[in-house]
Amino acid sequence: MVPKDGGDFFVKQGGYAEIEHPLGKKVDGVFRYDVMYRTGNVLVGSELRRQSAVQRFTVGAMVTVDRAFRVKASTEIWQFSDPEPGDKLAPRSDVSHAVAFHLGVVGTY
């Protein structure tokens, strides 16, 4: 447990779960959930709150082109417990979001 006053420290903890499942002969689906929770002291003027969390939901696919060659694509949705930077009056229930898309080529040897 982190006390409200005294000491310069914080605690970060988190975890993830991932499922990879074949969707066809050469296509695999990937589903992932990540979460990180932070509590403790923050710097003066920081946009972070004393208790902050971030979650990430990922859905993607991997296509096997050759035994040593894959193409990967995924979409991520990020969810932040803190408001957007500069929005210090936003209530705790307001959650910021971000979306990302990734496309990559993987070669193994």
Image (cartoon, rainbow, N blue to C red):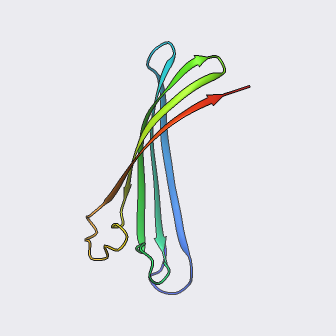
Residue 94 appears in which quarter of the rendering? bottom left
- 19 or 73, nearer to the observer: 73
Whether 74 is drawn above or below 52: the answer is above
Q: As drawn, is 84 to the left or to the right of 39?
A: left
Q: Residue at x 47, y 32 (%)?
A: 73
- 80 or 7, nearer to the observer: 80
Whether 59 is drawn above or below 56: the answer is above
Q: Residue at x 47, y 66 (%)?
A: 38
- Residue 72: give x, y in percent of width and height: 52, 30
Q: Residue at x 28, y 69 (%)?
A: 92
- Residue 80: give x, y in percent of width and height: 38, 59
Q: Residue at x 45, y 36 (%)?
A: 74
Whether 61 is drawn above or below 2: the answer is above
Residue 79 appears in which quarter of the rendering? bottom left
Q: Quadrant of the C terminus?
A: top right
Whether 59 is drawn above or below 3: the answer is above
- Residue 40: give x, y in percent of width and height: 48, 75
- 52 or 105, nearer to the observer: 105
